[in-house]
Amino acid sequence: MFDIDALLEGVRAGSISVAEAGAKLKAAPFLDLGYAKLDLHRSVRSGMSEVVFCQGKDDKFLTEIFARLLEANGEVLGTRCSAQQAQLLQGRFTDLCYDEISDIIRSPLKETLCGLIAVVTAGTADIRVAEEAAQTCEFFGGKVLRLYDAGVSGLHRLLSRAEDLQRANVVIAAAGMEGALPSVIGGLVGNPVIAVPTSVGYGANFGGLSALLTMINTCANGVCTVNIDNGFGAAFLATQINRLAVKGGQR
Amino acid sequence: MFDIDALLEGVRAGSISVAEAGAKLKAAPFLDLGYAKLDLHRSVRSGMSEVVFCQGKDDKFLTEIFARLLEANGEVLGTRCSAQQAQLLQGRFTDLCYDEISDIIRSPLKETLCGLIAVVTAGTADIRVAEEAAQTCEFFGGKVLRLYDAGVSGLHRLLSRAEDLQRANVVIAAAGMEGALPSVIGGLVGNPVIAVPTSVGYGANFGGLSALLTMINTCANGVCTVNIDNGFGAAFLATQINRLAVKGGQR
Amino acid sequence: MFDIDALLEGVRAGSISVAEAGAKLKAAPFLDLGYAKLDLHRSVRSGMSEVVFCQGKDDKFLTEIFARLLEANGEVLGTRCSAQQAQLLQGRFTDLCYDEISDIIRSPLKETLCGLIAVVTAGTADIRVAEEAAQTCEFFGGKVLRLYDAGVSGLHRLLSRAEDLQRANVVIAAAGMEGALPSVIGGLVGNPVIAVPTSVGYGANFGGLSALLTMINTCANGVCTVNIDNGFGAAFLATQINRLAVKGGQR
Amino acid sequence: MFDIDALLEGVRAGSISVAEAGAKLKAAPFLDLGYAKLDLHRSVRSGMSEVVFCQGKDDKFLTEIFARLLEANGEVLGTRCSAQQAQLLQGRFTDLCYDEISDIIRSPLKETLCGLIAVVTAGTADIRVAEEAAQTCEFFGGKVLRLYDAGVSGLHRLLSRAEDLQRANVVIAAAGMEGALPSVIGGLVGNPVIAVPTSVGYGANFGGLSALLTMINTCANGVCTVNIDNGFGAAFLATQINRLAVKGGQR
Amino acid sequence: MFDIDALLEGVRAGSISVAEAGAKLKAAPFLDLGYAKLDLHRSVRSGMSEVVFCQGKDDKFLTEIFARLLEANGEVLGTRCSAQQAQLLQGRFTDLCYDEISDIIRSPLKETLCGLIAVVTAGTADIRVAEEAAQTCEFFGGKVLRLYDAGVSGLHRLLSRAEDLQRANVVIAAAGMEGALPSVIGGLVGNPVIAVPTSVGYGANFGGLSALLTMINTCANGVCTVNIDNGFGAAFLATQINRLAVKGGQR
Amino acid sequence: MFDIDALLEGVRAGSISVAEAGAKLKAAPFLDLGYAKLDLHRSVRSGMSEVVFCQGKDDKFLTEIFARLLEANGEVLGTRCSAQQAQLLQGRFTDLCYDEISDIIRSPLKETLCGLIAVVTAGTADIRVAEEAAQTCEFFGGKVLRLYDAGVSGLHRLLSRAEDLQRANVVIAAAGMEGALPSVIGGLVGNPVIAVPTSVGYGANFGGLSALLTMINTCANGVCTVNIDNGFGAAFLATQINRLAVKGGQR
Amino acid sequence: MFDIDALLEGVRAGSISVAEAGAKLKAAPFLDLGYAKLDLHRSVRSGMSEVVFCQGKDDKFLTEIFARLLEANGEVLGTRCSAQQAQLLQGRFTDLCYDEISDIIRSPLKETLCGLIAVVTAGTADIRVAEEAAQTCEFFGGKVLRLYDAGVSGLHRLLSRAEDLQRANVVIAAAGMEGALPSVIGGLVGNPVIAVPTSVGYGANFGGLSALLTMINTCANGVCTVNIDNGFGAAFLATQINRLAVKGGQR
Amino acid sequence: MFDIDALLEGVRAGSISVAEAGAKLKAAPFLDLGYAKLDLHRSVRSGMSEVVFCQGKDDKFLTEIFARLLEANGEVLGTRCSAQQAQLLQGRFTDLCYDEISDIIRSPLKETLCGLIAVVTAGTADIRVAEEAAQTCEFFGGKVLRLYDAGVSGLHRLLSRAEDLQRANVVIAAAGMEGALPSVIGGLVGNPVIAVPTSVGYGANFGGLSALLTMINTCANGVCTVNIDNGFGAAFLATQINRLAVKGGQR
């Protein structure tokens, strides 16, 4: 994060005063709005800029955060954005795109898409979560292969695309009800599978708990799980993996 | 059960006394041993004789029940029978067979096996439960096709036998951990699938709860569920279905 | 499913090109609408056509699916259909019947009803689920015997119809609250009992969990369980069993 | 409890000093052994003497409590008493009876038994809990009618004794697994039914939770529930009700 | 229930035909309305007439049931009756009283109240449930002592009324949140305590589960539990006990 | 509470009659409004006056309670007060302040604030709960240090204020989702930390259960937990600790 | 923690080299044993030295940790120490005291005990947990008032000691089963109450969950909760509060 | 997997008979041992060979599997291997290494280690799980950085190593109790974090459920979760990610 040695060297050399260095050492690399602390440096650390979870934020607050982030980063991504919030934000900032299925609002894509992330759903009702994932991946520069309504009760729909899935650097698999999809995909591919339980279902699905337990207990290797309906979280992780595959990491 | 009209007719005709008829009407078709009531007539009603759940029964009690049932039905089936109990019973009654994997003890098979019941497991650790099911099916006259260690993380093991499964009148699918197997089989076959969650697994499997929830929430049609590790219960139901397929039912 | 040998023979004989055969081997027997994959071949495999779960589907999507299925199968069954959806569909397609209690919409019955399926409820509040089951059974050609409000706290209501229940090839038993009905029926009849827990109740019923646990833990033989409020699922399974009893299966 | 007015009158009249009265007002009607407080007055208030829960108490402690209670009340009842503890206590105090099934140890019965309490079990494995209940009822002076192994999967066993159950002032019904027995009895009798869930079962019974939920959600009127395996608690309550029926209460 | 012997004697003597007797033996003592089965004989068996759970019943159904029960019993009690339903019923039947706190609608009280039932609540929010209990007790002829807002965090409010509670034949104790009230009352009185967990609370009360578990695990003797918010169920049981105390039972 | 000895002395001396003393001994130190019992003496015992939980109370009741408490204590604090209720109360009583974020309504602060209580939140959505805590602390005379949006996924925001937190007599830490904040703070400070789980989150947070379990299982020392969203409860406890630190206690 | 300004001043003045300062800034104030990191500075920060959780630690590791802590602090406290471990440690280090009830091993008490902490239990089975709390409080210099077996089903045992409890700076209340004790104490005293749920009980206590939920949902003010059976955790917190009361804090 | 086109081309050209090709198409790429199906081709697909879960396997079975895998792959990895099993296997096969902490048995490492995977634990009791992860990573060719006992209640232990963690391609974070560690690490690093809940803890940790819920609900980005105590699963996934970073993937 901080280059402590450089700072200390400056103190020794007298180019930075003790007071100034003390302030810097204690200063948090975030922007304090009073009611919130925007983490502007996170884009440096993770290579991905701060994302706004719009749901439940009031209009004034939401507008200010978007303004600050656009100013700081030149781009912004908002998730769980209602149609009303989208209208407000699009009225205030030009160039924002809004997608009603995923409730994602964002600046136009800048990066050339590269790498390959597959996003698969078990049913059509899981598409809302899957699109939140897919569009987040694209915002962060990943190429996305979509394969929807390919649940395990009709395996041929999945098997007919097995080779495509095997080419992806990482697969995001969203499923509700019994949530068996990631286990099957985990047996088909050699790269990581990120399982997203969804709250789709009824009865004993207990708001997605059944799918969550299924995925956590998977007998397939290379499968991990995020929170129920957390398409964004899956996409963030998938982007990290995709970037490692594209740009390489520690060798 | 009772032919009430015939009984009443007998009363009217004087061939049966009021006292006698009253006694018959109130009499329960079971044998009261004091500490237990053996349901000897159940074999008439369901076509399947009373089965002994051996676990936890003391020696004297167990021996007496076996004696009574052998006397009444000419055959007996015991489940969850420990090696010690098996030794005791085999010493007392000739011709009892004991299987250490399934902990089943039984009289020699009498009926010619007919119909076809498939018993499938996800892993090798589920075989204990599956054999309890398979051998119970055979005791009640069903032919059994075994397919073990064919879980969803390696689909080719299952798909290579799809045609065999499709021929069965009913499939019993036992799986622990995430319990996805019955959903996949439900998508492959046209006849009923009986899902048996097993307690196999660790961590968040919660003694089989995860597999149970998976199976109850299945997105596949034609799948139903019995209790965790209840191989016997699955076999009893499978036998009922198999017999309907072999002998026919109400048209 | 596929006749692999015939296909290969065609390749050998030159009547089918390698490219064509490869395409066929990889082709999935489903109709891809982009947002959904209709499984038109399922009616071949299971003898029952694809059923539409209407709840939550938007109007355009719903209408298109109904159109495709009517075209492919000449009939259609929709479950969990709201009054508004029913009005839309009945305006678009002639001859659809809608039932407000069960929220079922369907083409007129074609097959002669045969076999016998009993549908029993513990209380009047369970009728909604029971009718979803009963009408689905009838759509798939089964004769249905209804016995409603026959819960275990007034046994005479159930016992007075015991002989009728014993004649059925399979019994569907729907109950909420403590869900004890299937256990009692399981002790009365010799054919399979499909238990449907319902979300009827309050307090510690936890949305149907109490009834589900009761049914999974049943001490009666020949009882299996489906998801909470899943009348359709019970009916699908009951139809499979009823058909085996009527048409016979593997001997 | 205390006759405050009499005490105050004594103070006014000078027959009791202020210090003495203050002490009495603050004094607790129990015997403080340091590690435990024996409630010797409870037998006055409830008409039933203090009962010892033996499980886990060390020998020295157990012996002292028995000695104190025998001295104070002339009789004693111990529950969950191991064979080893029984041997110790019988060696130390004459006239104690020990029952290995219920793990109850007690002084000989003194009172003439009166009233009628029925104790019913669903299976043979529930008898351990039922006997704890039955023998406690007898210790407190109730006549007990035992009806064991009369579960709901074989209703004739229960119905054949319906008239006997209807005569009882209160019924204790112990059941594990799905725990449906009390609901059925509640529909048969007009007096209170105390449901005792037992931990008997396996799989999704979760140590008796399934039976507990069943009983709490009962659709039958006049049924209440105590803790899992709590035969003693059921008996205490049944005794209170039985005594009200025999001796009458507030009119 | 039925006098089987008298019936059989009639058959023998020829005063009852076989067909007639058969019909009677099979006839259920209930009134079949098609969608519901009113148990008119229950008032004979339990001494308490059928009660209507109004919630969720449609207007036509509700009106018909009230008409039939008024005709059969000359009185009626309805619980969970909404203001709208009350208006409808009061418009159709004269003399019905409606209470908005408890949502109880009923015929005027006929019996002289006798015996004594105490109804206690922990807080003011529990009064809704308590009044359902209290007014049901009064409908069935019990005298009721109300003690509200007497929770355990201010014990003096409860202790100041201890003697009153000790006089009651039975105490109903309703509490939400931590639900400790019945344990404290169980230590104060010698007669039965019926604990009613309520859904009052927030956070980790899980809709009343916390209070339910507290009550089931009570360390006090003579306490039993009914379902969450089940004021009616507690009152039904309390009435049974109160009547045994007033009228006496089996001796 | 009562000075029993003085009272008894009065009786002995004849200055207080027996009847009068008996009445006093039984009298509860609360004001009985019929539907509620206001505990006016609590302010004496705890040093903190009765607080009104406004949610769900009807207007007439609410107004009367406020009137009584203002009369008795000269001040009042209401929590969970809706905007409508606030308008009503401010119209009726002058000088009441209302805060829309925390839903707190109160008399103007009287005491000089002293001591130091830190209130920290993990995110901005936890502020509602935190403000309920902070403003309650201030009403009871504590000085409050607020530190909001300082969750563990950006530790620098928290660490930059560590010295401030270490100066506080007690820290209130409110967090939803995974609820890790109190564990981290517990490792930073030497005084007590009161953890408040909030219902903020989605998916597997189960209404705050996940945060509650995290806090109960904390590996940090000096951390305790209150109910989900219970900002008031945390503040009451924090005030007790703060007062002990400011005024001293038993030495 | 660190005096950053002094360090920086040293760098500026040249008395500390950049390398040295950098090392210090990064250095963690703990002792790294390879397999564990002893936090020797914690005693500075919290005023309480590191405590050893002995359970499950192997002999070599345990001995080394005791040696290091004794060397660093001159005293040591171990919790959950088995009799075997105690024998080992007492053989190696002189002056260690071991208590078999609480499984606590410790150096002789050094400080004069001051302040007052009350430790109360509901039953005798809770004493094990209570003694862990009481002896930890004493080790850290607090005076302890013990009040055992004073559960809510016999209130007089608790009320007779109310004045003693009110004098304590903080009360630790340990209870299993229904866990109602802290709520009652919270209504009696004006200082903080730390509730410790214990795993004492059976049936639906679910290993202490029932008591935990009771305590979290308490209706009493000034009550907080720690983990099940966590006597040490309660004592640590109580010591912090007691010290604030004795020594004073921020004013 | 299969090269279908090449196969078909062979059929067309006559170089492969129809029968042979049919057999190949249906053949599963696994070795059927009867009781188990070894997936020898998995090493081709995932680049990682089949791993043996030793726990619960009997000696004969275990030995045969090790023999087959050594023969097929030239190396083998076994997890959850008991000391007895290790002795057996080491006696039978030369060159196997066994580690008692992690219960891992394996062939000597062949590959040069490359890339960087950090394995962190919250406490010393989590090391067992962490070593299973670390040694599996090394078996599959990854370099491992171990950082143990660095839990969140003493943050300096973790922060002092932040730069090391940031260099790793992926971090495995194992924690029991409240499981907050991965959230904190997720805020410190820019690459993926794999959270492993452990069953370490007591009381309300419910066998690891508390840590699992914490991790699933994490507020940090880039964190995913595997099953409780599943060190192997975390390592498999980490290896996949590490290899993508080292070798690159789809661009």
Image: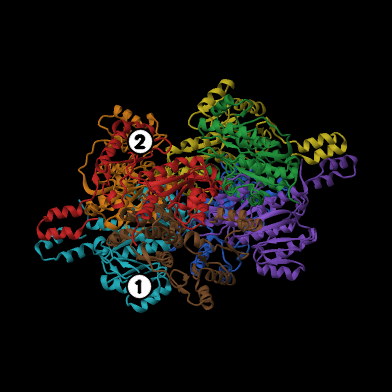
Chain colours: A yellow, B cyan, C orange, D brown, E red, F green, G purple, H blue
Residue F242 in the figure: left or right of residue H240: right
Residue B97 disc label: 1
Residue E228: give x, y in percent of width and height: 45, 46
Location of mark 2 (residue): E97
Quadrant housing residue G229: bottom right
- Circle 2: is it few (<14), some (14-19), or many (20+) Cα within 10 Å? some
Q: Chain of mark 2?
A: E
Seen from the viewer's position, the closer of residues D229 and C101 is: D229
Residue B87: give x, y in percent of width and height: 40, 76
Seen from the viewer's position, the closer of residues H7 and F217 is: F217
Q: Residue at x 42, y 49 (%)?
A: E117
Seen from the viewer's position, the closer of residues H224 and D239 is: D239
**Position above or below: C28 against E2:** above
**Position above or below: G3 against A67:** below
Q: Is residue H148 visible?
A: no
Answer yes or no: are tags 2 and 1 on the same subunit: no
Residue A27: give x, y in percent of width and height: 75, 36
Residue B43 in the figure: left or right of residue A191: left
* Kind of residue at disc 1: Cys
Q: Chain of mark 1?
A: B
Residue D43: give x, y in percent of width and height: 50, 62
> Do the CB atoms of the residues marked 2 and 1 lie less than 8 Å apart?
no
Q: Residue at x 44, y 62 (%)?
A: D231
Q: Is residue G104 visible?
A: yes
Comparing labels 2 and 1, the label whose residue is closer to the camera = 2
* Kind of residue at disc 2: Cys
Tell me the SS state at disc 1.
strand
Q: How far apart are the alpha carbons under marks 2 and 1?
A: 71 Å
Query: Quarter of the image containing the C terminus of chain G?
Result: top right
